[in-house]
Image (cartoon, rainbow, N blue to C red):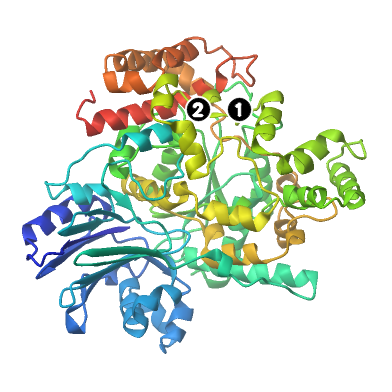
């Protein structure tokens, strides 16, 4: 966990080291163990670093001076370090005793700006060249450390987080009202604008080059350039996937102590756990801690009701079956008893320089992190990207494609097979045709009408789940912004799987999510790693044929073949889980406190203008005694469940920036 920053006086003025010190001080929270600054003429660099996450952390030293006056600051974690050593002509064994910054230094010397074509990992870097008055900054593709920048005609300031820029004292800390309005309706598609005016985000897979009078941001990575993968035998895809998955997990296991893992009853985290156990069995030391799985379960008092058809709120049963199959796996069930849904919210948002999006999962997420840290571990694995890589369902892709191309007989056979595997007696089923084949190919307006007609659907338009004031929504043009940024509240899936991946990788939320991740790691002291979202794994899953994900009625076909005989039937047949199923218990317990906060917000003209506070108070006050599951249980269910926590988070963020919080 680290942070970096740079100041470039494009008019040639020398950089004041006192400004670099202020930047370093603001970024110190993201790397409390080591830091450094360097000033050379019109350029200066700052760096902070925290140790204890990888064995090589203690070897980090920065800024790095190169011949010719260039200097580098680098943050992040390189992956496939053995391959990189080989490409640099180094023995693979050198990777074990070489800091990531040193590996990157050698890579820069070898390839210069083309380094981004040769290194893998989650990183960001800045290279300052005072003699040529040229600065280069970049973020890794797909996922990486954050970088924000502020530009005027005579100065460029870059930092991992906006607070590093504001620390200079002369950059206005003004909120970006349009981004706040977009966030209220869950439109996070803006890749470049931050929640502060004039502060820009450098998107993933982009390189920034600044010189006097010129600044260019170019896209250097595009997954569409990935060659397609075709094998002669069907089983070859499974073996290739296993090899890529093993390498991704091996990289994620590079930690001072054995990582923990967030464990559910789903195929993603359980596949990750089994693969990590294999790695520990082959490469783990005899005195290493066991793999620790932490499973969130509802607290006592939950009524057993979970929102969403077929969803279960307590996933402990299948996880216990996994424990029986793998006794070397240590598991704790975490009920986060008594913790309110907003505990730690202000602290997390202050560290993240942005309003928190997924407030409903904050309580159990931070309690799991607390237990990970209390157990002496600093790294937690997650399988959050799995359903977009190895466990992609493939159903809509294949069935929708058959419908689109008019292959009716095969569509009928596939639907029969799909129903048969799920114990559905009907052979064909109009509902299946509509849900899985016809509607994904329909115009968005028709798809929205269809979803609105189906009971229990809230992903229709933002009015169903957002607490934004209607007049404010019109004033801020949020509906027009939906079209301009290419977002949809219906989450309609295209039947073109690769186009879906391409669009997903360019979502604004992905390009700015690292900010919240760094803030979370700062507060919890735990770094989250997602091996199922590793670059080579994403590229492999993008490149293979659609039928590797669905065929003959079998969905998630790739991961099911990968895990054949390696997961218990309770996992393979487990229904989908519902995170934070006990939200009603926690919200009901603190309803009076939240109502008081909403009443107080009515006196804040900015908040009262943007958020429909009367609607929120009415929805909160009419919360029933049992967990509501449909609009018949609670007419404004989506707003009280999702819109209320997000609105409170955004209001607190705004008031904090403006100095109004209690």
Looking at the rendered image, the quarter that the C terminus falls into is top left
Looking at the rendered image, the quarter that the N terminus falls into is bottom left
Q: Quadrant of residue 645?
A: top left
Q: Which residue position is annotated with label 1?
A: 458
Q: Which mark is residue 642?
A: 2
Please tell me how crowded label 1 is: few (under 14), some (14-19), or many (20+) other residues with Cα within 10 Å.
many
Please tell me how crowded label 2 is: few (under 14), some (14-19), or many (20+) other residues with Cα within 10 Å.
some
Compared across the picture, whether 652 is left or right of 254 comes to left
Whether residue 474 is visible: yes
Secondary structure of the residue carrying tag 2 is: helix
Of residue 103 and residue 415, the one placed in the foreground of this image is 415
Q: Position of residue 207 (x, y in %)?
A: 36, 66
CA distance for labels 2 and 1 = 11 Å
Contact flag, marks 2 and 1 (Cβ < 8 Å):
yes
Of residue 40 and residue 88, the one placed in the foreground of this image is 40
Q: Residue at x 52, y 52 (%)?
A: 382
Q: Position of residue 601 (x, y in %)?
A: 31, 18
Q: Residue at x 62, y 32 (%)?
A: 313
Secondary structure of the residue carrying tag 1 is: loop
Compared across the picture, whether 301 is left or right of 178 comes to right
């Amino acid at each position: 966990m680290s942070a970096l920053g740079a100041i470039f006086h494009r008019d040639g003025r020398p950089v004041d080291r006192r400004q670099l010190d202020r930047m370093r001080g603001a970024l110190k929270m993201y790397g409390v163990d080591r830091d450094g600054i360097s000033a050379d003429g019109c350029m200066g660099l700052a760096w902070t670093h925290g140790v204890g996450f990888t064995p090589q952390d203690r070897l980090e030293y920065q800024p790095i001076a190169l011949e010719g006056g260039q200097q580098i600051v680098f943050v992040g974690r390189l992956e496939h370090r053995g391959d990189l050593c080989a490409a640099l002509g180094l023995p693979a064994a050198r990777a074990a005793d070489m800091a990531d910054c040193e590996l990157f230094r050698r890579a820069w010397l070898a390839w210069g700006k083309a380094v981004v074509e040769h290194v893998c990992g989650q990183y960001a870097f800045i290279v300052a060249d005072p003699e040529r008055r040229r600065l280069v900054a970049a973020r890794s593709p797909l996922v990486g450390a954050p970088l924000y920048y502020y530009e005027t005609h005579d100065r460029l300031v870059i930092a991992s987080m906006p607070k590093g820029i504001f620390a200079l004292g002369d950059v206005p800390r003004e909120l970006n009202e349009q981004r706040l309005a977009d966030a209220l309706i869950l439109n996070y598609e803006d890749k470049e604008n931050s929640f502060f005016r004039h502060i820009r985000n450098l998107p993933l897979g982009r390189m920034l080059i600044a010189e006097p009078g010129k600044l260019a941001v170019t896209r250097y990575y595009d997954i569409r350039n990935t060659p397609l993968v075709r094998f002669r035998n069907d089983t070859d895809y499974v073996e290739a996937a296993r090899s890529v998955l093993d390498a991704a997990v091996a990289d994620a296991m590079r930690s001072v102590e054995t990582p923990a893992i967030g464990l559910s009853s789903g195929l993603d985290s359980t596949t990750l756990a089994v693969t990590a156990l294999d790695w520990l069995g082959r490469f783990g030391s005899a005195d290493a801690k066991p793999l620790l799985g932490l499973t969130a379960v509802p607290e006592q008092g939950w009524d057993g009701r979970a929102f969403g058809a077929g969803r279960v709120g307590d996933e402990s049963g299948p996880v216990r079956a996994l424990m029986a199959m793998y006794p070397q796996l240590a598991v704790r069930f975490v009920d986060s008893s008594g913790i309110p849904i907003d505990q730690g919210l202000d602290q997390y948002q202050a560290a993240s320089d942005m309003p928190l999006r997924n407030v409903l999962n904050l309580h159990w997420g931070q309690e799991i992190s607390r237990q990970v840290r209390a157990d002496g571990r600093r790294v937690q694995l997650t399988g959050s990207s799995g359903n977009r890589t190895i466990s992609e369902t493939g159903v809509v892709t294949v069935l929708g494609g058959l419908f689109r191309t008019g292959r009716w007989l095969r569509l009928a056979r596939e639907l029969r097979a799909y129903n048969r595997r799920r114990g559905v007696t009907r052979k064909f089923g109009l509902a299946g045709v509509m849900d899985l084949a016809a509607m994904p190919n329909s115009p968005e307006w028709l798809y929205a009408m269809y979803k609105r007609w189906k009971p229990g659907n809230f992903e229709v338009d933002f009015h169903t789940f957002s607490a934004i004031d209607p007049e404010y929504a019109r004033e801020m043009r949020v509906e027009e912004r939906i079209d301009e940024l290419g977002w949809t509240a219906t989450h309609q899936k295209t039947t073109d799987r690769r186009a879906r991946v391409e669009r997903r990788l360019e979502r604004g939320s992905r390009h700015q999510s690292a900010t919240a991740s760094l803030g979370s790691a700062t507060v919890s002291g735990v770094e989250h790693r997602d091996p199922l979202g590793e670059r080579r794994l994403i590229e492999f899953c993008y490149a293979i044929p659609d039928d590797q994900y669905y065929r003959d009625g079998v969905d998630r076909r790739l991961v099911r073949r990968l895990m054949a005989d390696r997961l218990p039937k309770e996992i393979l047949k487990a229904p989908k889980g519902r995170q934070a199923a006990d939200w009603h218990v926690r919200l009901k317990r603190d309803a009076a406190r939240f109502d008081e906060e909403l009443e107080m917000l009515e006196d804040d003209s900015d908040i009262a203008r943007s958020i429909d506070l009367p609607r929120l108070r009415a929805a909160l006050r009419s919360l029933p005694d049992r967990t509501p599951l449909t609009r018949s249980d609670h007419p404004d269910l989506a707003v009280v469940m999702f819109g209320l926590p997000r609105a409170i988070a955004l209001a607190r963020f705004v008031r904090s920036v403006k100095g109004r919080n209690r």
